[in-house]
């Protein structure tokens, strides 16, 4: 394989950060959350009967709809390109309703614990390679097997340029792994609020598409489904691989993703508070949502092709990526996404990957190895974004149309 190296394998084993992920809607199927199964012990509200399948984002949705209806999207996007850091004042000239929404939405929830978020940064530093692989290639393939998520990405504006779409999703994944992600000099809060506005715009636009038949997309349930393709899937795989994780690290990792869920507009009483509740909710909302669609199959093929070309221009590493993706998500999801079986690479990956994990876990006990590994992981993440963006600044922008075709 021309030009193949371990570094390049790491770069694109991130699956170009999935191409989908949190910036896309998910399937609104399956039952609602049972009482006591999520959030701060609340689950679906017994008091008002709220069901996450029929709740969207009442704060962001009218703001995005107003910007679209007033024809202000180009100017708003131009202004927001200059807003990048958590502590940065908003640019002058934004519509009053948007400014009011962002000033409220950019704040951490009152229950966020900065010390726990900082502890999670150490976990990310030590486990970065696994996270790149699982967020990207694993989460990306899972997203392709969720019908409404795949269709929404395909028929929205981002579906016309999946590489650009992947770059924007990749920015969210990159920013959440910054050591200072939630601190004043970090970027995650800005990226999350911008993503929330994108979701709200898609809710307004996609029902106008002749190709979209599923009602209003990106409900609270939709976002929960997608959320479970990230921290839930990652922790499940790390446990399966017997990666060393302390109880404090596990709790901190969940806290990061609970705070991120809040910042993306998921209501607190729907967010699971313990790993037991996380796994129970995942079975309830993610498992029933998995199915094959033509759009999902096409997106999976595009993601793997883009990834393979990131390693070698000819894309000759595609069979290896097929095998790796199938190993990560399992045969059921791989079949739904129509990932080809590889008779040569498949057995090699199934045998070699556990050995690689064991070797890496033993090496991380040595002095300086975690720091060196983090440095490599950081270079990989930055290269992924550079490759996807063509070296340009990545701006998460409010769409003003659906897929033009």
Image (spheres, grey):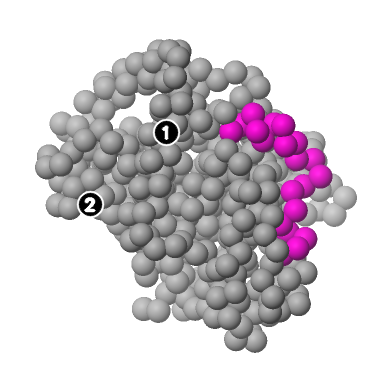
All told, the count of numbered labels is 2
Q: Main secondary structure of the magenta part?
A: helix
Report the side of 139 relative to 345 (left or right). Answer: right
Q: Secondary structure at mark 2?
A: helix
Q: CA distance from mark 2 to mark 1?
A: 24 Å
Are discs 2 and 1 less than 8 Å apart at CB?
A: no
- Give the percent coordinates (x, y) of residue 91: 66, 71
Residue 294 in the image: state x and y as whole percent: 34, 60
Q: Earlier in the sequence, mark 2 or mark 1?
A: 2
Residue 310: assigned label: none
Q: Residue at x 72, y 32 (%)?
A: 115
Disc 1 target residue: 375
Q: Is residue 351 above or below residue 236?
A: above
- Residue in view at x 26 percent, y 28 percent: 349
Under circle 1, the secondary element is helix
Q: Residue at x 36, y 49 (%)?
A: 384
Task: Give the residue at mark 2.
Answer: 309
Determine whether, in the image, residue 45 is placed left or right of residue 122.
Answer: right
Residue name at image x 61 percent, y 24 percent: 249
Segment tinted magenta in the rendering: 102-121
């Amino acid at each position: 394989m021309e030009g193949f190296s371990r570094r390049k394998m790491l770069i694109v084993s991130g699956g170009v950060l999935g191409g989908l992920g949190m910036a896309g809607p998910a399937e609104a199927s399956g039952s609602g959350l049972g009482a006591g199964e999520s959030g701060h012990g609340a689950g679906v509200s017994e008091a008002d009967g709220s069901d996450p399948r029929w709740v969207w984002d009442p704060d962001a949705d009218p703001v995005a709809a107003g910007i679209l209806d007033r024809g202000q999207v180009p100017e708003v996007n131009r202004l927001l390109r200059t807003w990048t850091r958590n502590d940065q004042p908003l640019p002058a000239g934004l519509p009053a309703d948007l400014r009011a929404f962002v000033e409220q939405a950019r704040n951490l929830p009152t229950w966020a614990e900065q010390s726990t978020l900082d502890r999670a940064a150490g976990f990310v530093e030590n486990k970065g390679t696994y996270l790149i692989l699982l967020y990207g290639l694993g989460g990306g393939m899972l997203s392709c097997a969720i019908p409404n998520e795949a269709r929404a990405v395909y028929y929205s504006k981002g579906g016309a340029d999946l590489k650009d779409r992947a770059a924007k999703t990749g920015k969210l994944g990159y920013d959440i792994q910054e050591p200072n992600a939630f601190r004043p000099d970090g970027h995650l809060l800005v990226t999350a609020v911008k993503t929330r506005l994108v979701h709200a715009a898609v809710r307004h636009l996609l029902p106008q598409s002749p190709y979209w038949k599923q009602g209003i997309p990106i409900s609270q349930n939709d976002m929960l489904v997608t959320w479970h393709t990230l921290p839930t899937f990652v922790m499940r795989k790390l446990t399966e691989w017997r990666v060393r994780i302390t109880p404090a690290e596990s709790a901190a990792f969940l806290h990061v993703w609970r705070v991120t869920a809040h910042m993306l507009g998921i209501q607190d009483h729907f967010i699971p508070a313990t790993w037991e509740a996380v796994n129970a909710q995942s079975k309830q909302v993610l498992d029933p949502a998995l199915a094959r669609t033509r759009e999902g199959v096409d997106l999976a093929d595009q993601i793997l092709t883009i990834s393979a070309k990131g390693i070698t221009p000819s894309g000759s590493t595609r069979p290896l990526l097929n095998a790796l993706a199938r190993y990560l998500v399992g045969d059921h999801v791989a079949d739904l996404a129509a990932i080809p079986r590889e008779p040569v690479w498949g057995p090699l990956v199934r045998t070699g990957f556990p050995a690689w994990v064991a070797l890496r876990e033993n090496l991380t006990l040595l002095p300086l190895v975690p720091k060196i590994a983090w440095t490599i992981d950081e270079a990989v993440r930055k290269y992924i974004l550079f490759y996807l963006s063509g070296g340009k600044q990545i701006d998460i922008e409010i769409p003003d149309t659906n897929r033009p075709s």
